[in-house]
Image (spheres, rainbow, N blue to C red):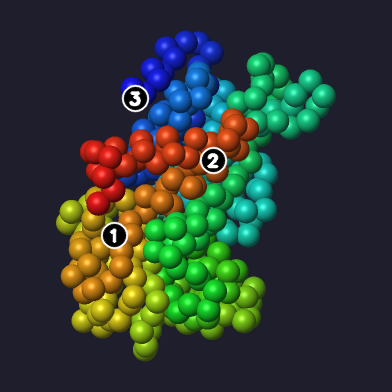
Amino acid sequence: MSEPAPKPVTASTRLAAVWGSPIRHSASPAMHNTAFAALGLDWRYLACEVAPERLATALEGARVMGFCGVNLTVPHKRLALEMMDELDASARAWGAVNTVVFEAENAEGVWTPVGLLRNIQGPVRMRGYNTDADAIVRSLNEDLHIEPRGARVLLIGAGGAGRAAALRLADEGVATLWLQNRTESKAEELAAEIAERFPAVDVRTGLPDTDVEIILNATSSGLKPEDPLPIDLGAYPLSRADAVYDMIYRPAETPLLRQALESGCRTANGLGMLLYQGAAAFELWTHRPAPIDVMRAALVREVYGSGESR
Ligand SMILES: NC(=O)c1ccc[n+]([C@@H]2O[C@H](COP(=O)([O-])OP(=O)(O)OC[C@H]3O[C@@H](n4cnc5c(N)ncnc54)[C@H](OP(=O)(O)O)[C@@H]3O)[C@@H](O)[C@H]2O)c1
């Protein structure tokens, strides 16, 4: 069956976007634009290269241009915390913003997503959410059948996504969580926060001294072909893990995932996480149920070039 054609762009077309640096790998435009067309919504989703020093300016631009929503990716999720007018409980709890909802007051004076308003009058405010944290737990569950409670987990990366995942997994009740990051001080800060907020979790920094159920890559190392592996395999062989999850989804098979397969691990890339964080953002902006199957199919086509996911 052919896809519904998108509505033509007009002066009333609603806008959303993802901003990051680098951004050209993003599959979010394909996922969201297909979903908008499937629901007959006059919306478009763009991807823009935005350098971190320009993030505040870009957000102000989107605010005054009537954007409905923005997703933030590498390296903006932590920076944006300071730039929001309001933080949703999810952004406060998981310490990073990946979804911005622009809001204005409706006729009754209630703050309402701009995407639901016919006219925007008065000030527009930015409310920051985190939809990554729930998405990673759901994807681990669906894609690798991993139940975090009681698990031993090695998480590599302590940026916006790594931080959200670490806190969310601690909240799920992992038994032992090892945090490893290129800049060690960030892993140590995160470990200290987890120790305080989730005292039942045994949190450590560095590499495990035992086997683990899962290794999660939450670094951006692997996005570019010349990137090094995010883990020193001499110090911790992948065969010590049952499964390896890479939040990167393009390339669909990173060198880390290839090595993991060769080491006999179950593997998954970040496509499921992208799907569920995107579906939650879609619902926050439009207040319409996200067409999950349509979005998944669009992502699979975009990333694998066919209906096959492997
Ligand atoms: N699938 C999804 O839906 C999804 C969602 C969120 C994020 N992601 C992916 O997750 C990754 C991290 O995103 P983010 O938003 O957390 O980015 P970020 O805030 O910029 O953090 C980047 C992380 O990667 C580490 N890093 C960068 N280059 C490295 C290298 N060459 N070797 C080792 N570590 C390196 C950084 O370490 P330092 O602290 O030392 O700089 C930091 O921990 C990205 O690849 C992103 O695409 C995917």
Task: Bin the neighbour count of mark 2 within 10 Å (Cα to Cα): few under 14, some 14-19, many 20 and up.
Answer: many
Residue closer to the observer: 175 or 265: 265
Q: Residue extending furthest right?
A: 108
As drawn, 301 above or below 181: above
| Local secondary structure at mark 1 | loop
Q: In which quadrant is the N terminus drawn?
A: top left
Q: Nearer the viewer, mark 1 or mark 3?
A: 3
Which residue occupies the foreground of this view, 162 or 27? 27
**Ligand 1 under 8 Å from disc 1 Cβ:** yes
Residue 259 location, x and y as percent?
20, 68
Q: Residue tagged by mark 2?
A: 281
Measuring 42% from the left and 12% from the top, which residue is drawn there? 8
Instruction: Look at 44% across and 14% down and name the residue there.
Output: 7
Q: Amino acid at mark 1?
A: Ser
Mark nearer the viewer, 2 or 1: 2
Name the residue tied to disc 3. 1
Q: Please identify the quarter of the rendering in which residue 51 is found.
A: top left
Q: Is residue 200 left or right of residue 45?
A: right
Amino acid of disc 3 = Met
**Label 1 belongs to which residue?**
221
Question: In the depicted view, which residue is nearer to us: 197 or 251?
Answer: 251
Residue 251 at x, y percent in the picture? 24, 50
- Percent across and percent down for residue 27 are 34, 39
Which residue is depicted at the point 24% across and 65% down?
Answer: 256
Residue at 36% across, 89% down? 209
